[in-house]
Image (tube, helix red, strand yellow):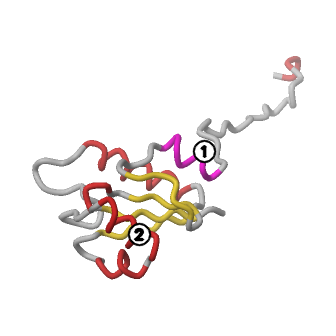
Amino acid sequence: MKKITVYDPALCCSSGVCGTDVDQSLVNFSADIDWIKQQGVTLTRFNLAQQPMAFVENELVKNFLQSSGAESLPLIFVDDALVMAGRYPTREDMSRWCGLSLAPKIKTIQSCCGGNSSCC
């Protein structure tokens, strides 16, 4: 299964969904994280304010920050390959990267008659 890693800008908390002026894109992303994890995908987030060493220890992230600055965050990696920068991915983005379908799974219900309408 795929692995998604997110390098967030400095946020007030681990999700960024706190305080009185919440960014709607972070609310949407939080819901999409829950969904993608339910699909079996591993998703890890690093917050620049709370986990700065994660940014320094990853050479790609460190070089990106040196050349583009923290205002270019978030950085999104899939299996250690940079796939997006500067905005949070949508559920559609993440499902495409991970080869997942967005269509809900529909359960087929068998009747007691097994398709024979004369028994009911």
Q: Which mark is residue 61?
A: 2
Say if the magenta span includes residue 96.
yes
The relative height of residue 106 versus residue 78 in the rendered view (above or below) is above
**Residue at image location 81% in from the left, 33% down from the top:** 112
**Residue at image location 30% in from the left, 77% down from the top:** 51
Q: In the rendering, at what x and y percent does residue 82 appear? A: 51, 59
What residue sits right under mark 1 in the picture? Answer: 96
Cα distance between the residues tagged 1 and 2: 23 Å
Looking at this view, is 53 or 12 the one in front? 53
Q: Amino acid at mark 2?
A: Val
Looking at this view, is 90 or 69 the one in front? 69
Q: Which residues are drawn in magenta?
A: 91-98
Locate residue 81 relative to residue 85 in the image: left or right: right
Label 2 neighbour load within 10 Å: few <14, some 14-19, many 20+: some
**Residue at image location 46% in from the left, 70% down from the top:** 60
**Residue at image location 36% in from the left, 79% down from the top:** 56
Q: Earlier in the sequence, mark 1 or mark 2?
A: 2
Quarter holding the C terminus?
top right
Q: Which mark is residue 114?
A: none
Q: Amino acid at mark 1?
A: Arg
Say if the magenta span includes residue 6.
no
Looking at this view, is 89 or 100 the one in front? 89
Q: Please identify the quarter of the rendering in which residue 108 is found.
A: top right
Residue found at the far front of this picture: 67
Quarter holding the N terminus?
bottom right
Residue found at the far top of this picture: 118
Looking at this view, is 93 or 33 the one in front? 93
Q: In the rendering, at what x and y percent does residue 93 appear? A: 52, 44
